[in-house]
């Protein structure tokens, strides 16, 4: 056991030359920052490039990189608001994982002196985690998710003497002129603060809008629901785009029926934003109404 523990070391602030030599002698990379203060974790990324197995808090890069067959992790969520209590719990967890999982696996060696399970973790680290954190992967993501899409959009807007760009600009001007004329005539939403929702409950919601000179196809109506826990709304779990149900004169009726997958108290609303096939994203045209 002393031989193993001596190889569990901390290297975040070592120089590159010293780290180059030290990393070669590391079997497991132990990193335990205070949640959520891990800036990134580049030393851990450097370690996995050299086949070093990580044991870290699910914070920074390890929150994305962790695989149960290629390392170990302390959960991201805090158990105690008091940092001293949390540190004590984390230290106990670390010792338990070392004693019950890591050390037995490291020393479970065959007649050749090799631990096949440990070697599988090393292989999974190199093949399954390391490629995700290379500069090539980053550049591939930039090209596929941003550069290519921006280039294609630019070419579309430039075509036919900027015909599409002129149409989009004209549409934006029309929407800006008519946005305030959109009236919320009627809203029907369940009030879970009065009667908390039950699992599997079927809920029907409806919003009626007086559109004026706005075309129904130019609007996106979304049903947004977020569960409330300890009087704080957590991130919305339900976002669903509504389809136009019918027109009643100049009023547009949108309705939506949902079956709850959670019970409890929810904050619920309708979100109304402009919609156009040439808008690259919602933030490109920052108009919004809430019902």
Image: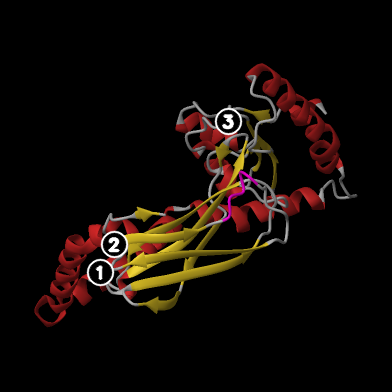
Mark 2 or mark 1: name the one nearer the start of the chain.
2
Alpha-carbon span between mark 1 and mark 3: 51 Å
| Residue drawn at x 50%, y 26% as measured from the top left | 14
Q: Which residue is mark 3?
A: 35
| Residue drawn at x 64%, y 51% as measured from the top left | 125
Q: Is residue 256 magenta?
A: no
Q: Which residue is mark 2?
A: 182
> What element does badge 2 sit on?
loop
Q: Quadrant of residue 258 in the image?
A: bottom right
Q: Quadrant of residue 75 in the image?
A: top right
**At which x and y percent is residue 141?**
41, 60
165, above or below 86, in the image:
below
160, above or below 67, in the image:
below
> What element does badge 1 sit on?
loop
In front: label 2 or label 3: 2
Q: Marks 1 and 2: in contact by CB < 8 Å?
A: yes
Q: Marks 3 and 1: in contact by CB < 8 Å?
A: no
| Majority secondary structure in the magenta region | loop
Could you tell me which quadrant the C terminus lies in?
bottom left
Q: Which residue is mark 1?
A: 212
Q: Quadrant of residue 272 in the image?
A: bottom left
Mark 2 or mark 3: name the one nearer the start of the chain.
3
For the record, the magenta segment spans: 190-194
Could you tell me which quadrant the N terminus lies in?
top right
Tell me if 61 is positioned left or right of 3 in this view. left
**At which x and y percent is residue 62?**
58, 43
């Amino acid at each position: 056991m002393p031989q193993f523990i001596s190889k569990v070391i901390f290297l975040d602030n070592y120089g590159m030359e010293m780290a180059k030599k030290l990393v070669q002698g590391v079997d497991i990379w132990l990193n335990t920052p205070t949640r959520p203060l891990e800036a990134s974790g580049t030393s851990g990324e450097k370690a996995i490039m050299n086949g070093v197995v990580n044991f870290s808090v699910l914070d920074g890069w390890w929150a994305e990189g962790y695989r149960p067959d290629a390392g170990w992790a302390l959960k991201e969520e805090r158990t105690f608001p008091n940092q001293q209590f949390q540190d004590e719990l984390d230290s106990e967890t670390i010792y338990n994982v070392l004693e019950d999982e890591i050390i037995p696996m490291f020393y479970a060696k065959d007649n050749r002196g090799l631990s096949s399970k440990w070697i599988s973790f090393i292989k999974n680290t190199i093949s399954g985690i390391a490629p995700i954190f290379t500069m090539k992967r980053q550049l591939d993501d930039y090209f596929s998710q941003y550069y290519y899409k921006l280039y294609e959009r630019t070419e579309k807007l430039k075509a036919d003497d900027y015909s599409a760009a002129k149409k989009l600009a004209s549409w934006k001007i029309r929407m800006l002129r008519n946005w305030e004329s959109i009236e919320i005539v009627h809203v029907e939403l369940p009030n879970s603060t009065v009667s908390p929702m039950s699992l599997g409950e079927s809920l029907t919601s409806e919003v009626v809008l007086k559109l004026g000179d706005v075309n129904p196809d130019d609007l996106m109506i979304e049903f947004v629901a977020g569960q409330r826990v300890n009087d704080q709304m957590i991130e919305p779990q339900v976002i669903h785009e509504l389809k136009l149900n019918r027109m009643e004169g100049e009023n547009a009726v949108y309705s939506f029926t949902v079956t709850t997958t959670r019970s409890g108290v929810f904050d619920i609303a309708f979100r109304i934003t402009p919609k156009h096939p040439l808008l690259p994203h919602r933030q490109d045209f920052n108009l919004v109404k809430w019902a």
